Image (tube, rainbow, N blue to C red):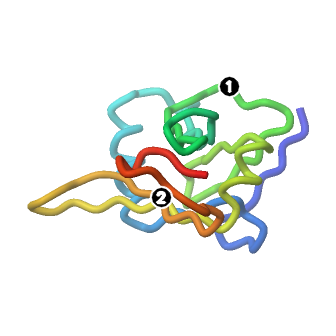
């Protein structure tokens, strides 16, 4: 299996993770007790605007996946999703009014009112 592994500072990475996102994902992974898991970030058809994001822990790395290392955290992106998220940033925020992950994607031309899908 030949994987394209790139460091988080490499310019052609499909997605950037903020320090808070990396810390939260590492904390969530620690509770899974499986050292083979990485975070898969994907774009799938669906939602009211055409596409939606998926994020889940995955241990299956395909030959064509892009694997990005963020300080020991592996982020997995399939080639089709990489085209749609190149330049995007995954962030995690926690506050009184809301907490959660958000993706700022410069490739989005429009999004729906619910904020869960994009085109």
Question: Number of labelled discs?
Answer: 2
Using the numbered discs, state the Cα–Cα distance from disc 1 to disc 2 in whole angstroms. 23 Å
Decide which of tag 1 and tag 2 comes sooner along the chain: 1
**In which quarter of the view is residue 109 placed?**
bottom right
Asked whether 96 or 38 is in front, the reply is 96
Residue 16 vs residue 84, the one in the foreground: 84
Q: In this rendering, which labeled residue sits more in front, label 1 or label 2?
A: 2
Residue at the disc numbered 1 = 60
Residue shown at 85%/33% (left/top)?
63
Q: Position of residue 44 (x, y in %)?
A: 62, 35
Quarter that holds the N terminus? top right
Q: Which mark is residue 13?
A: none
Identify the secondary structure beneath mark 1.
loop
Residue at the spot of label 2 = 103
12 vs 77, left or right, is: right
Residue extending farthest left: 96
Could you say where residue 90 lies in the image, as x and y percent from the top left? 48, 59
Residue 12 placement (x, y as % from top left) = 78, 68
Relative to 82, is 63 on the left or the right? right
Residues marked 1 and 2 touching at CB (< 8 Å): no
Residue 117 location in percent, x, y?
49, 45
Element at label 2: strand
18 left or right, relative to 86: left
Position of 45 relative to 13 (above/below): above
Which residue does the image show at 69% across and 44% down from the upper left?
A: 77
Determine the residue positioned at 66% across, 43% down. Answer: 76
Residue located at (60% from left, 47% from top):
74
In the foreground, 53 or 34 = 53
User: Is the residue marked by circle 1 packed among few (<14), some (14-19), or many (20+) residues within 10 Å?
Assistant: few
Label 2: few (<14), some (14–19) or many (≥20) C-alpha neighbours in 10 Å: some
Q: Nearer the viewer, residue 20 or 105?
A: 105
């Amino acid at each position: 299996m030949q994987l394209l592994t790139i460091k988080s500072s490499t310019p052609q990475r499909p997605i950037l993770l903020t320090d808070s996102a990396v810390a939260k994902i590492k904390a969530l992974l620690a509770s899974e007790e499986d050292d083979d898991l990485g975070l898969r970030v994907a774009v799938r058809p669906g939602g009211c605007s055409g596409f939606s994001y998926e994020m889940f822990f995955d241990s299956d790395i395909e030959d064509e996946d892009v694997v990005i290392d963020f300080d020991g955290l592996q982020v997995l992106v399939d080639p089709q999703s990489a085209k749609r998220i190149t330049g995007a940033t995954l962030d995690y925020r926690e506050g009184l009014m809301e907490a959660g992950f958000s993706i700022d994607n410069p490739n989005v031309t429009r999004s729906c009112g619910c904020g869960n899908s994009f085109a």
